[in-house]
Amino acid sequence: GLHLGTLVGFKFPILLDISLSARLEYRYLGANYLPAYFDSQYEIQRYQYPLYADPTKCSALGGSFDAKQSYCYVPKAAALGQLSEPKNGIYGELAFKFMNLLTVGGGVEDYEGPLNGAINLYATLPALKDFLQITGFYSRRAIDITQEAFGLDERSMLGASGRVKLGGGLWLTGTYSRQWTATGTGGTLQTVDNYNFGVDYALPL
């Protein structure tokens, strides 16, 4: 593969501390090549990676065919072996920081052909960590970026956590995450929404 790009950073020190960074790349993906093969969803995609294939070919690859979506879930290593055609694509990334109060950012990538897009978003409130902590992220891969950027299914990851200080070392906490569990049929995985609420105590040292 070939990656060519540029990284630009802007800082605005007048009155407010604001910074912005942007990254843009052209990418050429040769046959049997995937950028960021070991990405944030690798532990899921190593078992089921979405690939366009008819039911017969899907079975030959050891995958499970999703009739509703008309594509096949195969192990990522098997999908890599099916990428026989080179592809052109782009990757873009943007991050914004406002006075150390708020940090938001994300990245988008898209390549020729179906199921070759991805989006990643994140946000955090770093400056409020002494009494309020909030973070969140969203990731969706193997999609048509113009039509499927947002949605929750087997190609999506979503998580959020927050803590509010009640006093002393006592915190009220809450988390939400989408997790994957084995279905017991054909080695496939399915998503489960998890919510957790509780109280933490941090002992000062």
Image (cartoon, rainbow, N blue to C red):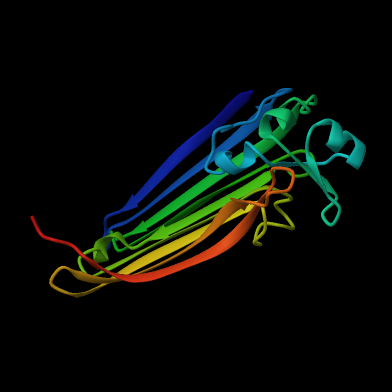
Residue 74 appears in the picture as rendered: yes
Q: Quadrant of residue 187?
A: top right
Task: Please state the horizontal and vertical placement of residue 11, each as a whole percent of the image.
Answer: 33, 50
Does residue 128 sit above or below 141 in this rendering? Answer: below
Q: Quadrant of the C terminus?
A: bottom left
Does residue 93 sit above or below 195 in this rendering? Answer: above
Residue 54 appears in the picture as rendered: no
Q: Nearer the viewer, residue 110 or 158?
A: 158
- Residue at image position (76%, 38%) is 112
**Residue at the outermost front position:** 184
- Residue at image position (33%, 71%) is 198
Q: Quadrant of the N terminus?
A: top right
- Left or right, 115 with reference to 182: right
Q: How many labels, in total? A: 0
**Residue at the outermost left position:** 205
- Left or right, 115 with reference to 152: right
Q: Nearer the viewer, residue 35 or 191?
A: 191
Task: Please state the horizontal and vertical placement of residue 101, each as a whole percent of the image.
Answer: 30, 63
Q: Quadrant of residue 64?
A: top right
- Left or right, 122 with reference to 190: left
Task: Please state the horizontal and vertical placement of residue 68, each as a whole percent of the image.
Answer: 84, 57
Q: Quadrant of residue 200?
A: bottom left
**Residue at the outermost bottom position:** 166
Task: Please state the horizontal and vertical placement of residue 136, each as a whole percent of the image.
Answer: 44, 60
Q: Nearer the viewer, residue 193 or 69?
A: 193
Q: Nearer the viewer, residue 82 or 4?
A: 82
- Residue at image position (44%, 63%) is 160
- Residue at image position (27%, 63%) is 16
